[in-house]
Image (spheres, rainbow, N blue to C red):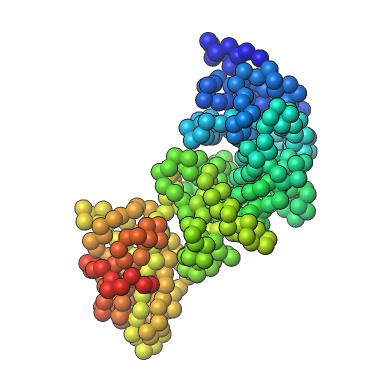
């Protein structure tokens, strides 16, 4: 099939529907839109029954299949062009956008779920055609958003989990929560399944589904998203969509978002899982496109599943730079409270901690480890400011007698650790000082 590209009108477009279409309902009809480096700005419409007529599909290359989710308003996903362009910048691959807007656009969500299962059959027909023409299941990578994540799982099951990889971006929770593995995405649906959960208390699926499940900010309220109905439609979809935008940031290389394997977000926040020493020589897992670098470790686990947690900033590129603050006190009486931290570099840039942890317990000659994170990555730190608080509005004010404070970058562990020795923190009063390199590198 020859695709003329001399006018924009001749290029197949993603189906654009309206809320009226959603009200009356739509019948499933799928467009398979192929993009490659040769036709990055003009899609080629594929036929799942006869791929041999394609002008641009090269089945010897990696094929990335992108599947959107439920579309209650009928409009194209706002991220659809970004993910196509960013993936093609990363690799010379086939990108197939699965446009099932006719079928996903309906106010009747159960109807969209029913159509999702039918869509999986059509995608199997397409992949079968690719296999007959020399493709390998190893080279098939499916990215499914919300309901699309379960479609990817349905397809993977039809190949007994031999597809190379599936990424689930906040897989849909409604009508899937509590279902058995054969009725939803599961880690056995591909050789490697990674999942990003960003709305587990509403539209997303709460429990782990993949080989590695990432829970940014605990998987619930995402920084920068509206917290009240005054936010309009963004109140309902911002958290859910954040998974897509976090994935896209992994392709832009503004920062590598590092995650920390842990049993729970509470444990992560309390600094119990901030080391990846147990996984060496592998580094901590990174979110997004390169998450499959952790596949080697997961193969050795039984079952091969891991949950990982991290915090982000409130806007792109969503980077959070993590530090450990290690404090040893010599108060005879145990003190329980919070430490607020600010750092300043040698040109005057200042940033303060954005992570709220549980109260720390400061016992005589015992380490209290506090996880903190900043939106700015400051090198050459010239000043550290600490504020101790018990959180009590009334009652006596306390002192915290600090024997040693140590600041260690987790995002850049090769950096020199900074210390300060023998000082006093007065409750609710900021104490600033110039740190010095620590006497040793152990923490």
Percent position (x, y) of residue 371? Answer: 43, 66
Q: Residue at x 52, y 66 (%)?
A: 278
Q: Quadrant of residue 372?
A: bottom left
Q: Is 57 in front, or is 305? A: 57
Percent position (x, y) of residue 360? Answer: 44, 75
* Number of marks in the rendered image: 0
Q: Is 383 in front, or is 379? A: 379
Q: Is 114 in front, or is 7? A: 7
Q: Residue at x 32, y 60 (%)?
A: 415
The image quadrant where one finds the N terminus is: top right
Answer above or below: position of 335 versus 43.
below
Answer above or below: position of 396 versus 203.
below
Q: Is residue 201 left or right of residue 114?
A: left
Q: Is residue 127 left or right of residue 252?
A: right
Q: Quadrant of residue 159?
A: top right
Percent position (x, y) of residue 442? Answer: 36, 72
The image quadrant where one finds the C terminus is: bottom left
Q: Residue at x 57, y 40 (%)?
A: 233
Answer above or below: position of 381 versus 431.
above
* Camera sees residue 221: no
Percent position (x, y) of residue 23? Answer: 72, 31
Q: Quadrant of residue 298?
A: bottom right
């Amino acid at each position: 099939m020859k695709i003329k590209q001399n006018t924009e009108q001749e290029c197949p477009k993603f189906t654009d529907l309206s809320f009226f279409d959603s009200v009356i309902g739509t019948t499933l009809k799928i467009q398979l839109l192929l993009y490659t480096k040769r036709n990055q700005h003009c899609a080629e419409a594929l036929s799942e029954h006869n791929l041999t007529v394609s002008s641009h599909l090269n089945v010897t290359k990696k094929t990335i299949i992108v599947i959107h989710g439920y579309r209650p308003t009928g409009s194209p996903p706002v991220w659809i062009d970004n993910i196509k362009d960013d993936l093609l910048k990363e690799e010379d691959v086939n990108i197939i956008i699965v446009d099932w807007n006719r079928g996903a656009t309906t106010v009747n969500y159960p109807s969209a779920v029913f159509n999702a299962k039918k869509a999986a059959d059509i995608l199997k027909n397409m992949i079968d055609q690719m296999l007959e023409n020399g493709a390998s299941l190893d080279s098939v990578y499916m990215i499914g958003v919300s309901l699309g994540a379960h479609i990817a799982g349905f397809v993977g099951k039809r190949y007994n989990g031999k597809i190379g990889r599936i990424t689930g971006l906040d897989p849909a929770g409604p009508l899937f929560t509590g279902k058995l593995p054969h009725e939803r995405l599961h880690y056995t649906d591909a050789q490697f399944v990674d999942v990003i959960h960003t709305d587990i208390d509403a539209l997303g699926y709460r429990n782990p589904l993949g080989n590695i499940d990432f829970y940014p900010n605990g998987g619930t309220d995402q920084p920068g998203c509206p917290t009240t109905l005054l936010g309009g439609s963004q109140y309902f979809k911002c958290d859910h969509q954040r998974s897509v935008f976090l994935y896209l940031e992994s392709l832009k290389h503004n920062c590598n978002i590092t995650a920390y394997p842990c049993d729970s977000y509470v444990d992560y926040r309390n600094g119990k899982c901030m080391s990846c020493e147990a996984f060496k020589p592998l580094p901590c897992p990174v979110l997004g496109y390169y998450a499959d670098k952790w596949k080697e470790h997961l193969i050795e686990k039984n079952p091969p599943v891991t949950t990982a947690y991290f915090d982000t900033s409130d806007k792109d590129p969503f980077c959070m730079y993590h530090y450990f603050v290690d404090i040893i006190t010599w108060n005879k009486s145990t003190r329980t409270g919070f430490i607020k931290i600010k750092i300043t570099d040698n040109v005057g840039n200042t940033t303060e901690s954005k992570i709220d942890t549980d109260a720390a317990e400061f016992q005589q000659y015992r380490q209290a480890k506090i996880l903190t994170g900043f939106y700015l990555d400051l090198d050459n730190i010239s000043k550290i400011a600490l504020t101790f608080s018990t959180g009590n509005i009334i009652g006596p004010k306390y002192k915290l007698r600090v024997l040693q404070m140590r600041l260690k970058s987790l995002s850049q562990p090769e950096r020199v650790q900074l210390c300060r020795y023998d000082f006093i923190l007065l409750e609710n009063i900021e104490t600033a000082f110039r740190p010095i390199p620590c006497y040793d590198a152990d923490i």
